[in-house]
Image (spheres, grey):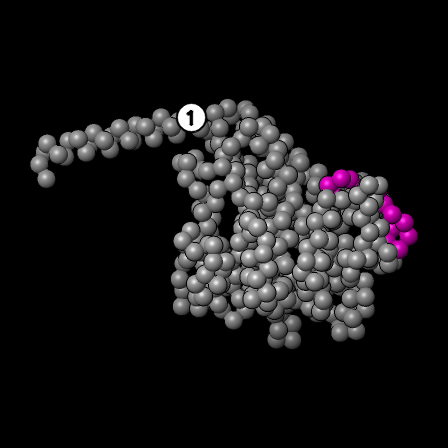
Amino acid sequence: MTRRTILPIAVLVLLGGLAWFQYSRRFQEYRSDQFLMDTLISITVYGKNQELLRTAVAAAYAEMRRIAELADGFPQPGTAAWRSSDICRINDQAGKAPVPVDDDTVAMLLQAQKYSRLSHGAFDVTVGPLMELWGFGGNNPHLPSPEQIRAALTLVNSEDMIVNKQDHTVFLRKAGMKLDLGAVAKGYATEKAASVLAQYGIDKALIDAGGNIRVIGRNSRNSPWKIGIKDPRTSDAIVAILPLVDTSAVTSADYYRAFEEQGKRYHHILDPRTGYSATHTISATVITKDAGLADILSTVFFVLPAEKSLELAATLPGVELFLVTADSRIRHSPTLSGTIEITRSDAYRYDEGR
């Protein structure tokens, strides 16, 4: 190559670099981390006005905190936190009377009930008595007896949860029933936070709510956000990379809260139909626009067998699924082929596009 051909190429590279520099200067980054909903939440936003970015993020956290307070099932009775919690008050009045609740509580519970029916009970927010029995809400999870599990199962049934949209009330038919929104509230709050950011005109943002990812627009380089899916059996590895634009990715996995007893491993994602930890899958990631829906579906698809999960995902518009199964297979929606980057490992078998 002659010097005469090298020079124009060098000029083009320089001009391209200057264009990118000028483009990138238009955007400032602001990031804030807070511990909320029992996890570290990070919000990163980009824009031209630093003060606007700070205000928008503060408002987004305030909205997440409001949802968290409504959905918190753990405050002590009589405290201000207990009185602020719709879930505590609903549980307290189980078998007694309907409870007036916030519109967002109604929305969360109606969506939860819808997918409980669609999954034929593989997902159920009335799983509270089982979660309490196993001790997953505290620091001492343990294996209950079969008799205890059978007794708790009699209180688990979303059809016994009466949600009155017109009167804004919720009623649990049986005394002893308890709601647990652990697979609903975080995703719902994340989506609400994204809506708040959009209202402030933020068009580039990433919310990471303990693995519940919601992105707005593209990243600061105007490219898709790249999100890694954690290897559920190797702490410092990933199994795939997802390119995301204006969407969410939520993972349910068995490594968050788990313990071993009598030589067997148990985790917190219970099958509401059996009362025991789900066994078909070790990691389920759902990609869809709404983070609240993704949160629910990631639990649905974790509990169901892989084949049924993939079949159900294919019937839901805009929903894609990535699974790591208990028999060490990687499976995913065919629509992810060509976009997802698979990180191959000898530890897994790969079923391309299935």
Determine the image quadrant of residue 276.
bottom right
In x, y percent, where is residue 232?
Answer: 51, 61
In x, y percent, where is residue 127?
Answer: 74, 59
The N terminus - image quarter: top left
**How many marks on residues?**
1
Q: Is residue 297 left or right of residue 94?
A: left
**Magenta stretch: dominant secondary structure:** loop
In x, y percent, where is residue 86?
Answer: 79, 44
Q: Observer-nearest residue: 86 or 113?
A: 113
Residue at the extreme bottom: 262
Q: Observer-nearest residue: 334 or 14?
A: 334
Q: Observer-nearest residue: 62 or 300?
A: 300
In x, y percent, where is residue 161?
Answer: 80, 54
Q: Is residue 24 left or right of residue 165?
A: left
Above or below 279: residue 35: above
Can I make out residue 232 in this image?
Answer: no
Pointer 1 residue: 26
Can I make out residue 177 in this image?
Answer: yes
Q: Residue at x 87, y 47 (%)?
A: 98
Residue type marked 1:
Arg
- Provide the residue span drawn in magenta: 93-105
Q: Observer-nearest residue: 229 or 266?
A: 229
Above or below 317: residue 30: above
